[in-house]
Image (cartoon, helix red, strand yellow):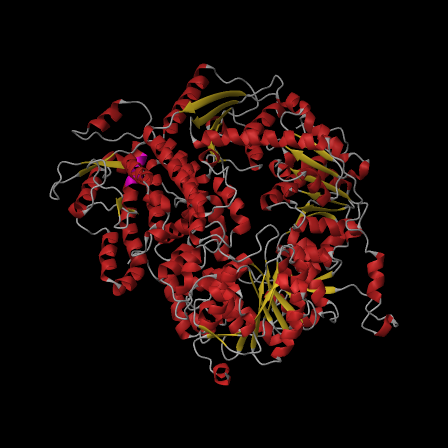
Amino acid sequence: MSSGDQAPVKLSLPLKYQQELFQELRLPGDDGNELVVIARGLGLLRLVTNLLHSYDAAGGTLILVVGADERENGWIGESLAEHAAISMSVKARGLNVVNTDVMSVGTREKMYAQGGIFSITSRILVVDILTSLIDPETITGIVLLHADKVVATSLEAFILRIYRQKNKKGFLKAFSDNPEPFTTGFSPLSTMMRNMFLRRVSIWPRFQVSVAQSLEGKKKAEVIELEVPMSDSMRDIQNAIMECVEVSIGELKKANIGLEMEDWNVDSALHKQFDMVVRRQLDPLWHRVSWKTKSIVNDLGVLRGMLHTLLTYDAVAFNRHLDTILAAHSPPPGSTRQNQSPWLFLDAAHVIFDTAKRRVYSGKATGNGADDIESLRPVLEEQPKWAVLAEVLEEIDRDLYFNPVVRDDSNGTILIMCTDTAQCRQLREYLQNMHVRMETKPGDEEEEEAEEDPEASAAFMMRRHLRNYLTWKKEFAKISAALFAENQSALNGASTTRASNSQSYHGKAPANKRRRVRGGGNTGSRPTRAANGSILAGEDKPLEVATLISEIQPTELESAQKEEVVTDPLDDMEDFYQLYDTEDLVVIHAYDGDMDEHVLEEVKPRYIIMYEPDTSFVRRVEVYRSSHNDRNVRVYFLFYGGSVEEQRYLSSVRREKDAFSRLIKEKSSMSVTLTLDAHGIEDPQEAFLRTINTRIAGGGRLAATAQPPRVVVDVREFRSSLPSLLHGRSMVIVPCMLTVGDYVLSPNICIERKSIKDLISSFKDGRLYNQAETMLQHYKSSMLLIEFDQNKSFTLEPFADLSGSYSSVSATNPSSDLQSKLVLLTLAFPKLRIIWSSSPYQTAEIFESLKAQEPEPDPIQAVRIGLEGGQKAEDQAFNREPQDMLRVVPGVTGKNIKSLVVEMGSLKEVANASVEELEPSVGKEAGRHIHRFFNKSVLE
Amino acid sequence: QVISTKSSGSSIIVSPRQRGNPILTNLRSVWEFSDIPADYGLGLTTCALFLSLKYHRLHPEYIYNRVKQLAGKYNLRVLLVMVDIGNHEETLKELSKTSMVNNVTVILCWSAAEAARYLELYKSYEHANASAIRGTESKGYAEKLVDFVTVPRSINKTDAVSLVSAFGSVRAAINARPEEVAVIGGWGEKKVRRWCSVVDEPFRARK
């Protein structure tokens, strides 16, 4: 590694553009405030760590890293330590990570006082600054990662505002390697910079001159592109999925007239996250759209997932995945066509399921009668990329053989990169087994061929997968039957017509009664259609399955092969531990963002096979190649031609380029005039007015209300934007651990804030009922704040007209809409007030008016309220998610959940507890319920 | 006349002041005119006042007089506000304050049909218990199970079914090691990490 010229600090920035950028950042002028937007894969984190190190080595500083995630913390920490060791700087302290509430307030305070570099989770940092655990004036500077996420109402913007209010000298360096968010909306770049109080922006796309020069020198990496055609059946499935997407989008358009949906088409569906795009467009009205629309949007997500799994999973796994999807989406028997996913009714859906099955096995119909045996034969189509991969490996082998090793610094290692660990596992298994030959069975031509053929084949692996699949399938049929049996028995009682329907759902109807589906009997089993027309899981006849199983019984040779252990045997790791020679390894890795840089540096591969395309990895290879003079790299680049994968890759390249062009354009025409003080120092007029309390006759006496208004806020509320906005309206925010309510405005006023989404979910699990109950116990004015989002439509009215819904207005029918639940709530708590707010901004104003003329709240009192004898406020720091899960468990009620949470440590403990262990905290009856829920076996 | 006010029969009692209000044409349950201090009588202890924001803007004092006339007669006093103007922020802020001072519960609606539906709901739920919002609804095991597994973000219905069917029971799924979960189709790294950390996460963040 070469070192920069900044002695005594040793840097590891070998490339010219990296050094330029570093110099720019370290420039003493212009108070060192800057926003850097850099293309993905150009080594952002490396730059950040070098920068941090240069401060670290100087010592005597307090630098905060904001917005780093867990892995980035790990990376920064490691390389800071490494740098400190290399440049032997005495003063370097490395990175301190504060990311949980676990660390006590006292230790945190002590740590901050010592100085150094801290990476702090935003939620904790904001509380620490507000409670002046960190004095903003002592902060030397803030390094902000993921600057693209800073919007006006975000926590980070809140932190920066407090910081800038109190501290005008400290620096702020913001980084982002995600240019796209900077280009949506009206003059987004300048808005974003205003949020961060920054004036200077520096943009580093891949096509920037010095970047291009650094990467396109004479040391370019050798790239070989290989376009792999998809197999016919894969293409069929992909087309069918696209058809389903098209129809689903059509349904959406039909159901939501009056929405802007011109760009909802199949072309945009090829785009990486079309379900997210649709979701975002619907988001303003999400609480109003019908149930059906929601389920269709959900379907789009499922379909997109399918497009991906089609390319990555092997044929058997894909079919199995489809089985699960089908089971999860099967409507409960007796339900009508209206409330099911529309795509399941399409012929295309049939094509998907049918073709997927035929990729695994097919049956030849010998007759139409029920007595004829339709024999099933394994087909086991292989993924086309596998063969190509095998060829590439062979070519590399030959290459190594004929051109003996050129002396250079890289290992002979072959690095294979793919999208996820599941893919890694698949490839590893394939490479291990591709040369396993099967014993020839007389009469089995196919395998004879395989015997003679030296080509790699996945037959062995696929046969094993199929065996596993068949056993799994048998159990799965039982499980889904068991799972949905309850529904069925309930419905059977209701009507006999449904009973017959549910029987066919079990798939136990004799084969000859099954409806013949288009296309004749070329397959033994296939998805059939239920009476109401939706696709039904096809059940194989036991006899057929038996023949199929015997067909693929492991041959002697196969069983001689050791069954591969799927999980890594970590227990007896030491027995197997051994250092491999790095010269001839094949390493398979999944793309993992910035971590890939480490992989490249450590593995030092001579050959890289990109099993799937990835823009940023291409850049990383470029950077790696250019950083090392003496390492030759050859890259093989595999992709399916005409597939979603290819489209996605191309569009991601295009979008990034567009985003950068727009950024540069905006930068050139931007006029930023900023004062550093946010909304400034407190308005003197306001401060003056506050000192004169008009309620005192004539305002004659200057009352002791000179202190600014105060609001006690529950620390968990810092996830929302409201505290930031309240602070923006010059209120003092006191973060506390509250047991009752979210906001305490005065000794009498307590407010529970609910966004629409929260409102729906907390009605569902009964949380709101309990919260209202305890609030009313302790406060005179208890209020429920229903807060709509800034950009969401301010109404609860559904799109569907209300005409048909009269039947639901009866006391016996617990109808599901929000209105009726609100009615029930107000009937149950006539004293509970409801506040409606169209946005968080509006809420801040309402709070102000509610607080006027009320005494200020007492934080200590507010914390104490609701605590039962002996409980301490610190014990109330709950993790929300596991508790939400616990609340769903039958037997757990709003009352006993508290003791359960105190007695038991985690969900795992509750799940493993016996009835006797549960009894002391929840009682016998509830304990039994809980125990039954966790231990009920779905296999029975 | 007197008798009809006392009885809390099955009909909604409407004050003659409301004659001509489009809500009445949207009311599909039984209703009758009767002289009551509120606009709508929705049961023995429940009443509603109706306010259109358009009207409120012209006569801001009207609603205060009406609330005063109620004189603490009802236990639950609903102020049914129809939002029929664009810039409602200022007015709604004022009404929030009013609701606290004068003990009325504000319910917003956006159309006559929705207003009528609220009235119908109040009347028909007069004697209903609150079990529908206490989270004590009875559900099938499969639904409960799916609900349970899908609480952590990014885990969907398909994942729930595949997870539990792979391990046999919820308990086994909770005790599963990350590597074992990762083998299941559809369970990517993110989901696996999310699931495994959430079941092991302590309920309370201890200090």
Single out the residue that lies furthest toward the right: A700
In this view of the protein, can residue A703 be seen by the observer? yes
Asked whether A463 falls inside the magenta stretch, the response is: yes
**Left or right: A360, with A409 as reference point:** left
- Tell me which corner region of the image, top left, top right, bottom left or bottom right, holds residue A36: top right
Q: Is residue A385 above or below residue B7?
A: above
- Tell me which corner region of the image, top left, top right, bottom left or bottom right, holds residue A490: bottom left
Asked whether A447 falls inside the magenta stretch, the response is: no
**Left or right: B165, with A843 as reference point:** left
The location of residue A375, given as percent across then percent down, is 17, 38
In this view of the protein, can residue A762 be seen by the observer? no
Which of A89/A369 is in front? A369
Quarter of the image that includes the C terminus of chain B: bottom right
**Left or right: A451, with A891 as reference point:** left
The location of residue A374, given as percent across then percent down, is 16, 39
Q: Is residue B75 above or below residue A732?
A: below
First to last magenta residue range: A461-466
Q: Residue at x 80, y 65 (%)?
A: A707
Q: Is residue A681 above or below residue A666?
A: below
How many callouts does the rendering have?
0
The location of residue A556, given as percent across then percent down, is 23, 36
